[in-house]
Amino acid sequence: MKSVSFIKRLVLVSLLTLSSWAVYADHQPSYSTAGFYSLPETGRTVYSMNPAWRFHKGNVAGAERMDFDDKEWRVVSLPDGIEYLPTEASGCINYQGEVWYRKHFTPEENWKGKQLFLHFEAIMGKSKVWVNGELLTEHFGGFLPVIVDVTSYLKYGEDNVIAVWADNSDDPSYPPGKQQDMLDFAYFGGIYRDCWMIAHNTVYITDPNYEKEVAGGGLFVSFAEVSEQSALLRLDTHVRNASGKSFNGKVVYELYDRDGRQVLSFEKRLFLGKNTARQVSGQVKVDAPHLWSPDSPYLYRLNVYVKDRKGEVVDGYYRRIGIRSVEFKGKDGFWLNGKPYPEPLIGANRHQDFAVIGNALPNSLHWRDAKKLRDAGLRVIRNAHYPQDPAFMDACDELGLFVIVNTPGWQFWNDKPIFAQRVYDDIRNMVRRDRNHPSVWMWEPILNETWYPDDFAKNVVDILHEEYPYSYCYAGCDETARGHEYFPIHFRHPVNGSGGDFNFDSLNPDICYFTREWGDNVDDWGSHNSPSRVNRAWGEVPMLVQAKGYAKPDYQYTCYDALYRNPRHHIGGCLWHSFDHQRGYHPDPFYGGIMDAFRQPKFSYYMFCAQRPAQSNESLIADNGPMVYIAHAMTPFSPKDITVYSNCEEVRLTYCKGGKQYTYHKPAVDSGMPSPVITFKDVFDVMYDKQLSRERKQADSYLLAEGLMDGKVVATHKVMPARRPSKLLLWADNEKVKMVADGSDITTVIAAIADGNGNIKRLNNYEVKFEIEGEGELVANEETFTNPRPVLWGTAPVLVRSTTVPGEIKVRASVVWEGKHTPVEAELVITTMPSEHSLVFNNKEMEEHGRELKNNVEKKVGSSSDCEQRIRQLEQELHQLKLKEVEKQQSDFE
C-alpha cells in the first residue's frame, strides 16, 4: 500500500494563508469531503480511497472473504460507472445487476488511536460493505452517503480488504422504485461517486448522515434577522467523545471574509462524559454582512474547532457559508435578503448523466456543468430527480446558482410500508447533507409526478420542518398532486404558456407559483418527436428551430418570453433540460438540452447567454457582460436569414468586406424576454460567396456582428465559410480548471476539422481516432464507438482520465484512413497537478493497472514525432500547390 501526498505540506501551508482560500485569485475550484473542508493541525485528515479497486461484473460467491482470489478482476478507480457506454445509450443499454468491488490497502501507522470512517458519497442501488470479512452495513438507495465506522476492524501492518457488493437491478422496495425500462432517466450503477477515509481524534465533530439526529449531527449553520446592516448567525455543533474518559473544553468558531480577514470569533463551553455526545448551540451577530445572491455569491469561511481545557485543538474543519434569507410571499413573489427579487428566476433541470461514463462524473465535471449553466445566465437548477453530487452543490454555492433539491423518485409508489419509510429516510438525509449550502432555494421532498397517498404529502412536509426547523425552509409541489395544500410553492405553467391559468385573480394569494419543467414540446408521450429535441449533429436549421421554441415560438407555449410576461405571483421556471441525457423507457436519448451529452453547445445555449445582463459583474466567476453570437455557419445550405443572439442595446451586422450593413436596436418593452432573438432577413447569398471565391477573394466573405452599448462596440463575433479541410484542431474543454493527478479526474478534449485558417468545417463525414501517451488514459474504446469517433457538426469529443502521477498527457487526434490530402493530425499536451489529498492504494494493483494502460497504448499508439508532423504539414502545402494546376484547368474549361 502506498499513501501518495505530493503537495500535502504545500496545501497545509496555503490553508494557513487565508487569502489564498479565495477562489477569485485563480478560479480553481475546491471541493468538500464528507461535508467539510480540511484544516491543518486539527488532527483530522482526509484520504482518497478512489484509486485501484478490483472490479467484477456479475454474481460471485464468497467475494466478501479476505482470502478470496480477485487477481483476475480488472483494476478500476472511482468514481466508476461499471462500463463505458456508447453515446446513444438510451433504452436500457446499460448493465443492470450485481457487481463487486474489492480494495486492498495497508492502513497508515498514524491511523492508530484515531476514529476512522469510510465515507462513500453514494453507491448505486442496494449495497453491502464488508471490511476484512465483517459485514458493516447494508444500504438501500443510490443517491445519498453510505458511511461506516471502521475503527475497530482494521489490521495494521498487513493487507486489509474492503469489499462492496452493489446491485442496480429493478427493486420496488426503495426509491425511485420504478423499473428502469419504464423510467425517463437512467441511473446506471457502481460506486459512482467519491470514497473517502476520514481520520480524526476520538473527540470529534460528528457526521450528520451517520449520527441520524433530527435537526442535528455535525455542524448546522442557520440565520435570522438578515439585512444589510446585520445578521444573526446560529451555530449548532454535535460533538462525540469516544475517548473512554470525560472531556472538558470548548467549541470555537472563527468567521473569515473572502479576503481572509477575521470577521468574528465566538466560543461555547463543552463538557462530555466518556462515550457520550451532545450538541452545543449559540448565536452571534455579524455586522454589515456581505449577503449571498446569484449575482453576488459571496462566501465566508467558517472555521470550527474543538479545543481541550488547555486550548489545544483536538478536531476541526471549515465550511463555506453564505449569509442570505429567502422568502416566498405569495402574490408578492419571491424575496431575497429582505427585498423583492427584481425578475423571474430562470433556470434548468439537470441530470448528472454524462456521455460515455453515465453518472460517474469526477468533481471537476460537476463544477464545469455548473459553470457552463451559470455562463448561460441561469440562476436556478432543479436537481432532477435526486440529490446530486456534493461537488455540484459546492459549485452552485460558488458560482451563484440557486438549487431545488429533490428526493429520489419518479412516477412510482409502493404501498408496502418499507417503501414510504425509505423515502422518509432519504428526505432526512438529503436535508442533513445539504442544509448548510446557501444555494439551496427550496426543497422538493415529494416524488416527481407520482400519485402517492393523501397523507404522504403532509408527512414529508412535517419531516422537512423537523429536520430544518427555521422559517426560511420552503418546499414545492405540483399543484395537481395530492396534498399540494401543505406546500407554499405550487408548480404550474403560467399565463401565455401551456396549461396556464389566464386569470391570476383566481390564484391563491398566499401561494407562489413556479414552473418546474418548461420548453419540451412532444407530439405524444410515446413517440416523443418534438421541435425542442434536436441532436447537435443535425445542424443549423434544427438548432435554430429549438432555440426559437425556447425563446418565443409562433404558437402558444411556455417559453422564455412567456415566463417574463407574468406578475410576481409566478416566480420563474426551469427548462427541461440543460443537457442531452440517456433514458430508460425510450430508445432515443433526450435531445432537448441546450448542450449535448459532452456539453458541446447548441444554438439555444447562446440564446440563453443573450438573456443575461449586458453589464459586467466582477462578483461572478462565471462569464458575464455583453455578448453577441452569429447562429449561422455560411455553408452552401445555410439559411438566407441571419440569426443573432445578443444582450446589447444595438447590433450591427456586416456581410462581406465593403458590403451592406444592417442595424438592430433592441426595443424598449415592459414585458417579455430581456433580449429577443434577432433576425436579419435575406442577407446570406451563397452565390455571392461563390463569386468572391472565384475572384480569389475568399477573405472578403464573412459575417461580422458587433454589439454596441452607449454607441460603443463592446462585443464582436465573426464567421467565415470553411474552405478545404486541411487540419485538425484540438483543445481541452476544461473551463480553465487544471487537471488533477488523482486517478479520477476527467477532461473533455475536442477535435475539430478545420480549413487552413482555423474555420471549423461543419459539414464533413470524417472519423477521428484518438491516441494518448503519458500520465493519462482515454475513456473510450472501439466497442462503444467512442474511439474512433465520427465527426458531428464539425467536432469529435473524447474523454481523458488522469493517472495518480502528476505529469504531462499527450493526446493525438488524426483522421481514420490518412492519405495525401487528408487533414493533418493535431496534438495537445495537458499538464496534471498533484492531488490535494493523500491517495490510498495497493502498489502492486496500481502497477498492474499502469501496465494495462501501457499495453493498450503500445497496441494503439503510433504517435508521430515533431519532425514527422512537420513533414506531413509540408506535404500538405506541397499538395495544395500542385492542386492549383488542377484548379486552373477546371476553371479554364468551365
Image (cartoon, grey):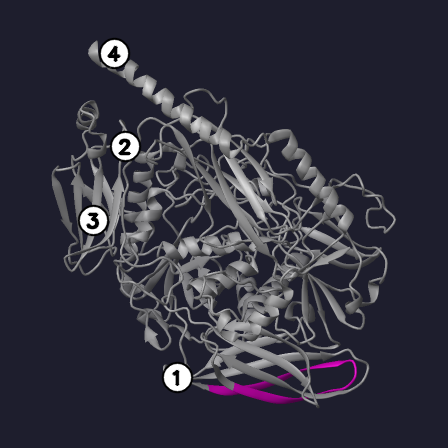
Give the distance between the C-alpha atoms of the residues marked 3 and 4, in whole angstroms: 40 Å
Q: Would you say the residues marked 2 and 3 are in contact, meaning their CB atoms lie under 8 Å apart?
A: no
Residue at the extreme top of the image, as rendered: 893
Q: Amino acid at mark 3?
A: Glu
Give the distance between the C-alpha atoms of the residues marked 1 and 4, in whole angstroms: 78 Å
Q: Which mark is residue 612?
A: none
Q: Which mark is residue 721?
A: 2
Range shown magenta: 265-285
- In the visual, does 839 lie left or right of 701? right
Q: For mark 4, what is the residue?
A: 889
N-terminal of the two: label 4 or label 2?
2
Q: Is residue 201 visible?
A: yes
Report the residue at 55% width, 58% height from top. 387
- Camera-near label (3 vs 1) is 3
What secondary structure is marked by label 3? strand
Q: Which mark is residue 288?
A: 1
Give the distance between the C-alpha atoms of the residues marked 3 and 1, in whole angstroms: 41 Å
